Amino acid sequence: MSAFCACRGPPGKSPEGTLRTQISKERSVRRLYDGKERWKAEMRWIRRAQEKIAFSRHFLRRLKARRIKMGDIESVVKAGEIIQGHAPGAYERNQDPVRVIIGPGADGRTLHLVVALKKKSIKLVTAYYPDPEIWEEDLRTLKRRKR
């Protein structure tokens, strides 16, 4: 068997500007808004899935570190909306579709909640207060990276 793979080129080389790289960039843009036409229905499903929610260890650690209360999470789920969607497999450790939900915490501060949509349940991945250095004023739009 040859060490050359037709899909990747010679081992150790990743030429920029190849068709594969261009397709990869296109997919990353599409992944950010994956399934946008389904977001309202998914949000309704998330709200109804109260007994089917799982918490990742990362989520529980971040809540404690960021001093976010469960009441804040409940408030975001009740009043929030999906602002970003990531396609299945967008993250190595999570092969499920991921959504970012924005909403007011119990204290009124804007909070982002990241959830993974499993087949029959929802897994809370993390929660955070959006950083104005990263997010536009609306706290829904990522700022463009400075080059």
Image (cartoon, rainbow, N blue to C red):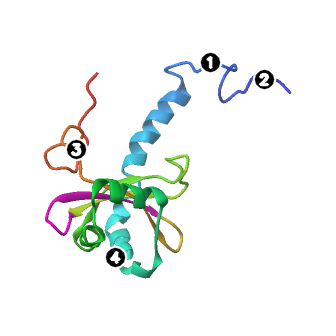
- Residue 99: percent from left, percent from top: 38, 58
**Label 2: element kind:** loop
Q: Residue 27 bears which disc, if any? A: none
Amino acid identity at mark 4: Arg
Separation (CA) of disc 1 from disc 3 = 36 Å
Residue visible at 48% across and 59% down in the picture: 57
Q: Determine whether, in the image, residue 39 is placed left or right of residue 146.
A: right
Amino acid identity at mark 2: Ala
Separation (CA) of disc 3 from disc 4 = 26 Å
Between discs 1 and 3, the one toward the N terminus: 1
Residue visible at 34% across and 64% down in the picture: 39
Q: Residue 13 bears which disc, if any? A: 1
Residue 112 inside the magenta-drawn segment: yes
Separation (CA) of disc 3 from disc 2 = 45 Å
Between discs 3 and 2, the one toward the N terminus: 2
Between discs 3 and 4, the one toward the N terminus: 4
Q: Which residue is mark 2?
A: 3
Residue 20 inside the magenta-drawn segment: no
- Residue 43: percent from left, percent from top: 33, 70
Between discs 1 and 4, the one toward the N terminus: 1
The magenta stretch spans which residues?
104-116
Residue 79 in which image quadrant: bottom left
Q: Which residue is mark 4?
A: 47
**Label 3: element kind:** loop
Q: How many other residues sit within 10 Å of disc 4, few (<14), some (14-19) or many (≥20)?
A: some
Between discs 2 and 1, the one toward the N terminus: 2
- Relative to 6, is 113 above or below? below
Quarter occupied by the N terminus:
top right
Q: Nearer the viewer, mark 3 or mark 4?
A: 3
Q: Which residue is mark 3?
A: 131
Q: Nearer the viewer, mark 3 or mark 2?
A: 3
